[in-house]
Image (tube, rainbow, N blue to C red):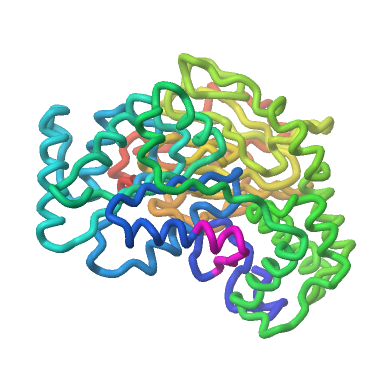
Amino acid sequence: MYTDMFRLRELPFRLTPDPEFLYLSKNHARAKAYMESTVWFTDGFVVITGEIGSGKTTLIETFLSELEKDVVVAQINQTQVSAVEFLQAVLVQFGFSPFRMKKAELISTLNNFLIEQYSAGRKVMLIIDEAQNLSLRTLEEVRMLSGVETTKDKVLRIILAGQPELSAKLDSPELVQLAQRVRLRFHLTALSEEDSKAYVRHRLEVAGSGGREIFEEGTFPLIYRYSGGVPRLINTLCETAMMAAYTADRDHVLRDDVKSAIAELQWPEFSERAANRTAELGDVSTTGRFRGMGTTRQAPELYVGSGDTATNEAVPEPPLAKLVVVTDGHTIGELPLRPGRTIVGRTPDNDLQIDSRFVSRHHCQIVTKPNACIVEDLNSTNGIMVKSKRVRRHNLNDGDVISIGRHDLIYIDERSGSSGQTSALSPPSGADNPDSHGETQVL
């Protein structure tokens, strides 16, 4: 990639939540301190909210990396589950195999485990990311777990992290008892313009810039105007701008490179994006979790999420290509690809969400350019397969099949004059068998 041109050790603006790249603004430092307080207090129950891409997950990963060995942690990222599935997921994190247990047995096993760990002098912590997706019934199970105690202390520390909808849900009349147990709440806001500049420089320094000014001073106001200080949007815009400088054979980024990146991503100013966000999200089906694509049947595990990249913006130009989404041998929809970046992964902040335990939080990205389309693995657990081979980066050709877990994405290049007919296309042999890909369950 462009690291050699810019004399960097690694990519500075990856979307993966790497603790090494964490920039602690005043707000992020305070949120981290609230997380750390759960270790100090036996009744620690903290709620951290923030908009998509504000850095919640990176904070969690940093917090986890600094915990002492006497803290036992269950980290739950898959939250679109029933109450029983949630209890099973927690027990799996603690090393149990609970899938044949009934609910009463699940609760008893968890309670006994918590008391045993307390007696052994260990602290037990439950961290739930994307907690806004938990149902009211599942949140009631969280409340019940928070009440497990000895004669002196409660034995489970809890951190809930999620989008702003989480706060609204906790304030509902049905959850008044859970809300009363929360010790601290904090909302993580976007970075200020000054912090946005410091954030960019910090990530470049961690990647090996050695103090060199890779982004010229005039780029920062433009970056802030179009990113709104949201870390994930800053990452996307800066990486695209660096690619523009790289193609121009320059080792520094000019204001024109940022303008080129904005045009490629087809972003409006952030203020306009925020004003239109609600209208852009559309309605979510109450019977299925699939949105924004022409479906031929309901898709219980896959839908277009509320990601931050260009594919969510209304654009007048026709798509350059499309992905035909196939599950279990059935075509379930299509996703148009326009110039810019499309992120595919398990969580709702992706442009294309595949709600599967075999898919990582941010699994891969598809970069669409006027004359090319590239798929790149984002350090996922199970990787991506093209032509039955695991790849890190692949230039897509018309008809290529990208296998992600049990799902297949068939790439149709509209520029090649393809008719886009999918009936003659079928997933590769073994696509329906997770073992054929050497998959690891991702919780």
Please give the name of the residue rendered at 53% of the width and 17% of the height, measured from the top-left corner: 285
Res 178 seen here: yes
Please give the name of the residue rendered at 76% of the width and 38% of the height, measured from the top-left corner: 273
Question: Taking 297 as reference, is 95 above or below it?
Answer: below
Of residues 104 and 156, the one drawn nearer to the viewer in this rendering: 156
Query: What is the number of callouts on the image?
Result: 0
Give percent across and percent down for residue 26: 61, 63
Question: Taking 149 as reference, is 330 above or below it?
Answer: above
Of residues 392 and 423, the one drawn nearer to the viewer in this rendering: 392
Q: Quadrant of the C terminus?
A: top left
Q: Quadrant of residue 398?
A: top right
Q: Left or right of 150: which side holds 166?
A: right
Give percent across and percent down for residue 430: 34, 38
Which residue is the extreme one toward the front?
A: 152
Res 437 seen here: no
Give percent across and percent down for residue 386: 49, 48
Of residues 203 and 439, the one drawn nearer to the viewer in this rendering: 203
Q: Quadrant of the N terminus?
A: bottom right
- Asked if the magenta segment contains residue 415, the reply would be no
- Asked if the magenta segment contains residue 30, the reply would be yes
Q: Left or right of 29: which side holds 142?
A: left
Give percent across and percent down for residue 300: 43, 23
Please give the name of the residue rendered at 60% of the width and 38% of the height, measured from the top-left corner: 351
Which residues are drawn in magenta? 21-31
Please give the name of the residue rendered at 67% of the width and 80% of the height, measured from the top-left corner: 209
Question: Taking 370 as reference, is 298 above or below it?
Answer: above
